[in-house]
Amino acid sequence: MSKKLKEFITGLQPTLRELKFSLYRLKRSPLSIMGFSIIGFFVVIALLAPMLAPTPLGDDPNMMPKDGFLQWPLPPSNVPMRISTYGGKYFQQQFAHPFGTTKSQYDIFYGCIWGTRNAFRVGIWVTFTSLAIGLVIGIFAGYYGGVIDELMMRFTDIILAFPGLILAMAMVAVLYPAVSRADAVLLALVLVGWPGYTRVIRGEVLRVKTEDYVEAAKAVGCSDLRTIFKHVIPNSIYPILIIASLDIGSVVLTVAALSFLNLGPPEGFADWGQLIAFSRNFIIASPQDPYKYWYTYIIPGIFIFTFVLGWNLLGDALRDILDPTLRRK
Amino acid sequence: MEKEIILNIEDLTLRFYTYEGIVEALDGVNLNLKDGETLGVVGETGCGKSVTGLSTLVLVPPPGKIEGGRIFFGTEGKSTDLLKRDEAFLRSIRGKDISMIFQDPRSALNPVFTVENQIAEVLMHHRIKEFCGNVVGRLEKEIQNKKTGPLKRFIYRLEKNIFTRMQKNPKSYTLRILSRIPIINRYKRRLKKEIREEVVKVIRETEISDPERVADMYPHELSGGMAQRVVIAMALACNPTILIADEPTTNLDVTVQAQILHLIRRLKEKFGSSILYITHDMGIIAEMCDRVAVMYGGVVCEIADVMEIFKNPLHPYTKALLESIPRPGKELKSISGIVPSLINPLPGCRFHDRCQNTMETCTKIKPKMIEVKKGHFVQCHLYAR
Amino acid sequence: MGLRTYIIRRLLFIIPTILGVCLLIFAVVQILPVERRVMLFIEDVKMIGAKQQIIEIYGLNQPAYVQFVKWMGELLRGNLGWSEVANSAVLPAILDRVPATAEIVIFCAPIIILVGITLGTISAVHRDRPLDHATRTLSIMGTSLPSFWIGIVLLAVFYGGLGWFPPFRFGNEVLLYITSPGTPWRRYTGLMTVDALLNGQLWIFLDSLRHLVLPVVVLTLIQTALIVRVMRSSMLESLGKGYITAAMAKGLTQKEVINKHARRNALIPVVTISGLLIAGMLTGLIITETVFDFPGIGSFAAQAAIRLDIAAVLGYALLSAIVFVVANLIVDVMYAYIDPRIRLG
């Protein structure tokens, strides 16, 4: 028993060594450090959301609290929120509007903080689901080839013929009454997303399939599934990781764009894109003080930008590190 | 009759500044090449033979830096240290006086350009004046010819004007502007024709049977042997004094190898070039070379005539190398140990950890190159007396 | 194989793809109840009242394949349905707005290509030096910026704050001038800049340029960032190849080697990514036009989506898909032109 364990560990040595090297490069690369820190920062915010921006009792935490009925935004201030004492809805402590309020008195701070949760949820869910679907279909198409492959590839070609946002818009418009807009957006993005992964995975499977060690594995009698798991997947994983991390950023951007176009969650939902949509009327204030309502668009925008930047940096760093030809420069 | 030395590398030191440390790739390399001879440079992978070749052209890619030594290149009494010359001079030498054949012909050729394009590139760069002269000559004949009509004569005169200008100053501004204007730049066709003729001629020299067709092909359409012939054609297009051949047959099939070796030998005789032949194969050395330099770990251990080296190897490494050549019937011998990492090289002689005859001095002091017999140099403490 | 054969093969290949696209849209349409599907067949105001008859005529109650054939027939006639948002048939509504969008694209495209390729090359050649770091930082930031946000910020600063570059397509005076009854304005191409010059009205030309600045800037910013990144990485790869050393060994200058040898090979991935670029433009247009209230096909699509005008949205989707497929064809042909290895199948 211990002999087999020893063999296993020795077999793992090169992988471990490479992993250590990757981590080393990761730690040294300023890009990846920045990327990680940014994402870590947002993770903390998302986890601490209920403490940072508590929900008035009885409300849906994803909806931003409305503090009053004024139509125009109020600047950031320490004036405590009125709803903390407004009939029925109350907090245990007084909370103010550190980021100000936007149209209809939605609290920007709350929107940004809970928007982080939404961003993670949406980004990870869509990417993960697209990846999963793409993985399955890609592996099948690549490994078994033939008619299945052709059909799958035609199908992905057709979906890829549509620029992403446009197909998403069409799906939302069509599905509307039956499916809520927010859900329709998610479904549409998954539909648009999986072909990309399929293409890449299939390419990798095809490439690895012709490598000698797969032939060797088959000659030794490995079953198909085992060959796939043991040989094909580990070798195809790197490009997938890179694409996935870049994808989370782009998904969040697309979702924000759709929310901005009012094709997303219902009004009042804590979503960065929505916050910016709210600010549209207040970009141009009076000539004396044109940037009066800067906080309505600058602050949510910074959140989106930094979030996506973090994932892009990470993806870039991963690409630099995992690319075997550039590894040892 | 003593042949003249045309290339003299003295004490060449080269370092690579990499991520994992400073690689001492060459540590005081000494060798010379005589006019008309083929000098073989032999050694295992990683001994620095390829870099030596590249250094001769002063083309070491970063993170490599040449840190010391002299490379004297000279013909007819005046020689110059290449390491001290400026880039413009070096460029005039590369491809014309010293040219190189690469190990992997397919990666040495740019996949998006035709064969003709790539050979023409060398010709255009170095021999443009000569071609302009040819065109001028032809145009002159056409002008003198009684049969050409006055309009044609006028056009020819204009073209002759352009080409005479080009001859004097190939890179002039006016020419560059002219060559961009659609109808006027038809004059280029004449030049192209001239050059294409020469290209086909050069390709034919390399024993390719259908040079016209090959000239229009792309590198990926060529077989390995043909691609290498094309690379050879490129290198010989301007009739260089020195040809550096960096393992030109390593990536080819055995049968093709023999053909290419034969070709190189023939071309050398025809054009009178000297060859610096880099290889790891002692068999090729025996076939092709007049003298041999044995390299190990970034230094040259031994230089001698081919016959002398095979009959009377002095350096322990050379001896081990010769013994390890596979012979039918005999047991396969190898040299114990592995090729050293050159990042923190051993002090003293680079070979001392694998040598059978290591002495105390070998671990501390680097041996100097000594002429043990006439024309036979060794760098080893065993012979230091 | 030769370039010509390759082109013909690719052309033939397009047909099944376009058919597939139509199939997909059709499948999406089938989700809707019959009453809403009717909008796809209406061409004229007068037909709105006759919905029941239309359902009969076009067989919307019959099995799917019959409907599909009828629908394809309508498509080939150019009938994409009726748009409630535009209050006209879909195809004319879209075509009407094409010149506005085209104007933006015409200004964007050359800038993106030239600046992208040049910056990418310089960045690769001067690897790891200050210029490279600056370019890389800017291009990463460029791909992380939400286009609608940068549009809004720019609007706030350059319009709200400075008043230089207004949104929409033309100012009030221009609008009055063009639409007043006895106006000498003749519409030649539909492009404001060109038409203004052709009409000899320099002030209109300047005015339309003013209105174009912000949308063009926003759209180019993000696409250029992408091209710079791809060009840089492919140039780096190209510079590491053997033929570069071989070319230097022939005696060429560094400049010649970069411009002739390295660049041609480096352009290959860039060309392939142009397809992505076009998709990016099509989507970017929707957002940019909405932010700046620019009356092009992008903002039309956005409004249609919000108001659930399915005929318009689906019509737009279909047209963009076709444009995209054709664009990819052109890209593939260019790719084959640059890289002879592709032509051999």
Image (cartoon, helix red, strand yellow):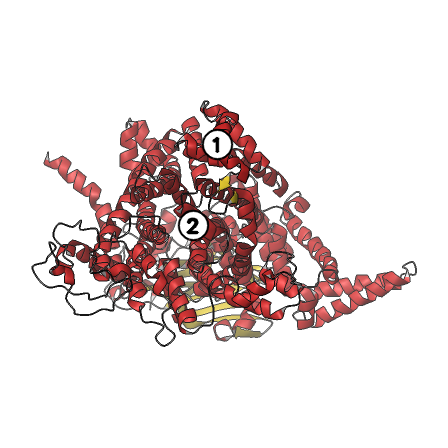
Q: Which mark is residue C51?
A: 1
Q: In front: C43, or B86?
A: C43
Image-based side of B162 in relation to B26, left or right? right
- For badge 2, the amino acid type reads Ala
Task: Judge whether residue B244 can be spotted in this image.
Answer: no
- Circle 1 sits in a helix, a strand or a loop, which is it? helix
Q: Is residue A22 above or below residue A234?
A: below
Q: Which mark is residue B59?
A: none
**Helix, strand, or loop for circle 2?**
helix
Rendered location of residue B309, percent (x, y): 43, 55
The three-letter amino acid code for the residue at tag 1 is Lys
Q: Residues within 10 Å of mark 2 (few under 14, many from 20)?
A: many
The correct choice, above or below, for B87 with respect to B299 in the image is below
Question: In front: A303, or C170?
Answer: C170
Residue at the outermost bottom position: A288
What residue is disc 2 on? C302
In the image, residue B145 lies at what x, y percent? 89, 61
Q: Chain of mark 2?
A: C
Residue B301 appears left or right of B100: left
Write the residue at 55% across / 58% down. C103
Pick the quarter of the image with the C terminus of chain B.
bottom left
Q: Which image quarter holds the N terminus of chain B?
A: bottom right
Callout 1: chain:
C
Residue shown at 59% from the left, 60% from the top: C179
Earlier-in-chain disc, 1 versus 2: 1
Q: Quadrant of residue B195?
A: bottom right
Quote the CA–CA distance across marks 1 and 2: 26 Å
